[in-house]
Image (spheres, rainbow, N blue to C red):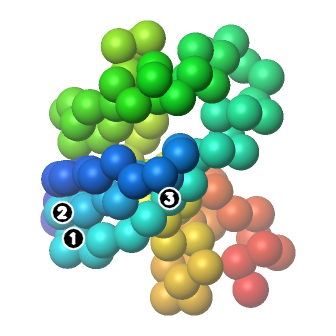
């Protein structure tokens, strides 16, 4: 049985960038600027204030904010490694890529 993917550590970088470490040993950097600033869902609005964004914490193997928002570890993994050709089938299976995008 494959263990559940979890985030084990994170380090805030500049802006909306975060360095992430996962329980499979991979480490990557994500930039959530476009998600936070262009997603129209109200849950992202408070994070546009960088001071609020910086209140991020590790909770239950993922990122969470006091505003009630949390992001799935699979989404964070996709954001960090979306260009890795060896992971395209996994991302397709998770629903982050349409079948034609995975090739």
Task: List x then y, in percent, for residue 71.
Answer: 44, 36
Q: Marks 3 and 1: which is nearer the front? A: 3
Q: Is residue 12 above or below residue 102?
A: above
Residues packed near mark 3 inside 10 Å, few (<14), some (14 to 19) or many (20 plus): some
Q: Quadrant of the N terminus?
A: bottom left
Q: Quadrant of residue 55?
A: top left
Q: Quadrant of residue 95?
A: bottom right
Residue at the location (40% across, 53% down)?
Answer: 13
- The reply to whether the C-beta atoms of the residues labelled 1 and 2 are less than 8 Å apart is yes
Residues packed near mark 2 inside 10 Å, few (<14), some (14 to 19) or many (20 plus): some
Q: Looking at this view, is 60 or 90 the one in front?
A: 60
Element assignment for label 1: loop
Residue assigned mark 1: 24
Task: List x then y, in percent, for residue 45.
Answer: 65, 17
Residue assigned mark 2: 23
**Cα–Cα span, label 3 and label 2:** 16 Å
Residue at the location (57% across, 88% down)?
Answer: 85
**Cα–Cα span, label 1 and label 2:** 4 Å
**Cα–Cα span, label 3 and label 1:** 17 Å
Q: What mark, if any, has residue 40 been given in the picture?
A: none
Task: Tell me: 67 left or right of 3.
Answer: right
Q: Is residue 6 above or below residue 19?
A: above
Task: Tell me: 18 left or right of 32.
Answer: left
Element assignment for label 3: strand
Residue assigned mark 3: 30
- The reply to whether the C-beta atoms of the residues labelled 3 and 1 are less than 8 Å apart is no
Which of pointers 3 and 1 lies earlier in the amino acid sequence?
Answer: 1
Q: Looking at this view, is 32 or 69 the one in front?
A: 32
Task: List x then y, in percent, for residue 41.
Answer: 72, 19
Q: Marks 3 and 2: which is nearer the front? A: 3
Residue 77 is at least partly visible in this image: yes
């Amino acid at each position: 049985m494959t263990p559940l993917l979890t985030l084990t550590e994170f380090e805030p970088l500049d802006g909306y960038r975060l360095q992430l470490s996962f329980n499979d040993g991979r480490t990557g950097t994500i930039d959530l600027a476009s998600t936070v600033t262009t997603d129209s869902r109200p849950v992202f609005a408070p994070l546009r204030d960088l001071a609020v964004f910086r209140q991020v914490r590790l909770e239950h193997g993922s990122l969470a904010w006091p505003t009630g928002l949390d992001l799935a570890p699979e989404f964070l993994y996709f954001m960090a490694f979306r260009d890795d050709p060896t992971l395209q089938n996994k991302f397709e299976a998770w629903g982050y890529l349409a079948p034609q995008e995975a090739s």
